[in-house]
Amino acid sequence: MTRLGVPIDYVMTAERAQVYKPSPKLFEQAYRMLGVRLDETVHVVMGMFLDMKACHTFGVRGIWVKRLGQHGNLD
C-alpha cells in the first residue's frame, strides 16, 4: 500500500464479510464494524456498472478506477 502515499485504515472484503454484492448488507456490515458514517468514507471500485451502481443505490461516495477497457458514463 505504499504506492498510495497514505495509510489505509482498513480493507473490507466480501469474502471476509461473507456477504456479496450487490447486497447492501456488505456496506451495512462494513460501516457497523468500522463505526463510521457514510459521509466519512469512499468506496473505490473497478466496475462501473455493478460497483458504482451499488454505491449510488446505497448512497456511498465512489471512486471508479478505469480498468479492463470499460467505459464510464463520461466516456
Image: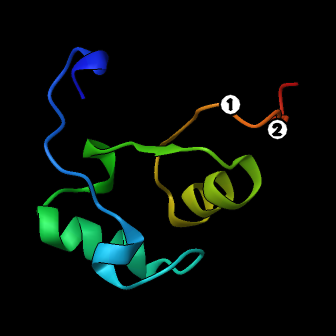
Q: Amino acid at mark 2?
A: Gln
Question: Looking at the picture, how far across and down is residue 7, in whole percent?
Answer: 14, 28
Quarter-of-image position of residue 57? bottom right
Q: Residue at x 19, y 20 (%)?
A: 6
Q: Is residue 15 above or below residue 63?
A: below
Q: Residue at x 82, y 38 (%)?
A: 70
Look at mark 2 in the image and give the residue it sits on.
Answer: 70
Question: Looking at the picture, how far across and down is residue 31, in whole percent?
Answer: 24, 66
Look at mark 1 in the image and give the residue it sits on.
Answer: 66
Q: Amino acid at mark 1?
A: Lys
The reply to whether discs 2 and 1 touch (Cβ–Cβ < 8 Å) is yes
Color theme of the render: rainbow
Dot 2, how many residues are within 10 Å of its Cα: few (below 14), some (14-19), or many (20+)? Answer: few
Work out which quarter of the rendered image holds the N terminus and state it.
top left
Question: Looking at the picture, how far across and down is residue 47, in whole percent?
Answer: 68, 49
Disc 1 secondary structure class: loop
